[in-house]
Image (spheres, rainbow, N blue to C red):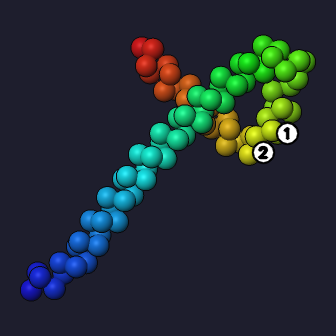
Amino acid sequence: MTHKLDAAVTAIRRHMYEVTRHRTSMNEHMLAAGAQLLALRARIEAGECGDVDWWEWFDANVRHSRKDAEKLMRIAEADLSELGS
């Protein structure tokens, strides 16, 4: 009787594997983007582009939501503080 369910079980396992794989990739991209945003913010705030407000520069150049950027930077900051401890 179990053999009738084998195809469904195989499909579920494949989907669950893909979820895990994509989640890992997504987390890596989130950390990388957050770390790059933090580094860029430090450069902008240090005056590399003149007297420019970080968020004004971000809005004009990156064109993603501030909420998303703040979330990515918090994630990267938490990761960096974990590495430092």
Where residue 32 sits, quadrant-wise, is top right
Query: At 48% from the left edge and 27% from the top edge, which residue is drawn?
Result: 79
Q: Secondary structure at mark 1?
A: helix
Query: At 11% from the left edge and 81% from the top edge, which residue is drawn?
Result: 2
Of 25 and 79, the residue lying toward us: 25
Q: Quadrant of the C terminus?
A: top left
How far across and down, in percent of the image, does residue 29 sit?
52, 41
Query: At 60% from the left edge and 33% from the top edge, which residue is drawn?
Result: 34
Residue 74 visible in the displayed image:
no
Furthest toward the front, the residue is: 49
The residue singled out by tag 1 in the image is 60
Looking at the picture, does residue 72 appear above or below residue 77? below
Query: How many numbered marks does the figure carry?
Result: 2
Q: Quadrant of the N terminus?
A: bottom left
Label 2: how many Cα within 10 Å (few below 14, some 14–19, many 20+): few
Q: Which mark is residue 63?
A: 2
Amino acid at circle 2: Arg
Query: At 81% from the left edge and 38% from the top edge, which residue is drawn?
Result: 61
Badge 1 vs badge 2, beta-carbon distance below 8 Å: yes
How far across and down, in percent of the image, does residue 62 sit?
76, 40
Q: Which mark is residue 32?
A: none
Residue 66 visible in the displayed image:
yes
